[in-house]
Amino acid sequence: GARRNLVQIALVHSGNSTEALRTWELRWKDLTPASVETFPPVSDGTSDVTLTYAVLPAGVAAWVTSRQGVRGGLLPDSPSVLEAEVREFHRLCASPTSNLQDLRSDARKLYARLVQPYAREVSGAGRILIESDEWLSSLPFGALVDENGQYFAERHAVGMISSLADLGREVEERFAPETPAVIVSAPRAGGREGLPYLAGAELETNELAARMVRPVLLR
């Protein structure tokens, strides 16, 4: 709504990518106007790079944040085209019968559209932290394929964050055994016909629950 319009004005009409990103991040209560003097927050990792995506009325905006600062703008591709490609790639990744060649072709195409514009910062990064938005949140970024034919997660540690405010927190504060957690296991996908039983999903949720102090496990 209004927040996205303000971000678009700062990014497209004013050409101020840092101000646009700051406006976008202020939608979260963890990043308050009082913190703008130190914006953007910087990760403890010296080689960390953050990629932030936002779906705006005019298109998909992307920013890269590193110790060198902020660089960003609107991606040239139509958001409807990007959304269709992301959803198709997600479908291919979710099916064990998908053609690997088709999957890798789509993975390379999405890498070129979403990550390649920031290759300068990404190439030397040890860890890539990704803040996505709307339908982009379903994209398994680590499965994208770079220009050398390698999976993104082969060359970098890839992690997801909810906002740049996460960068200012200690790892223990983000997630620890004492952290209140609701863990959901749905290996049968709600009993829907035609969907395979995911034995790995139940195994993973059980392993995670065993590491927590007081988890709430829903089956």
Image (cartoon, rainbow, N blue to C red):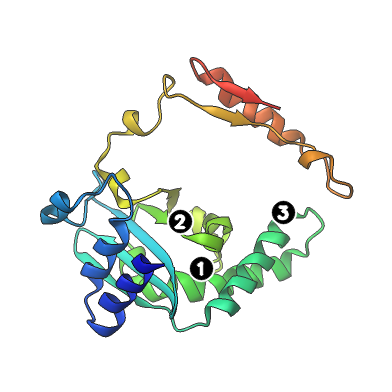
Which residue was labeled with disc 3?
Answer: 94
Amino acid identity at mark 2: Arg
| Cα distance in 3D space between marks 1 and 3 | 20 Å
Left or right: 212, with 19 as reference point: right
Q: At which x and y percent is residue 116?
A: 43, 73
In front: mark 1 or mark 3?
Answer: 3
Label 2 packing within 10 angstroms: few (<14), some (14-19), many (20+): some
Check whether the beta carbons of the residues at disc 1 and disc 2 lie within 8 A of each other.
yes
Eyeballing the image, is 194 above or below 101?
above
Q: Quadrant of residue 72?
A: bottom left
**Helix, strand or loop at disc 2?**
helix
Q: Check disc 1 and give the amino acid type.
A: Asp
Residue sitting farthest toward the top: 213
Query: Among all residues in the image, which is located at the extreme left?
Result: 37
Determine whether, in the image, residue 60 is placed left or right of residue 19. Answer: right
Please state which of the two labelled residues, at mark 2 or mark 3, is closer to the viewer. Answer: 3
Q: Which mark is residue 64?
A: none
Q: Which residue is mark 1?
A: 146
For the point 58% across and 22% down, which residue is it?
216
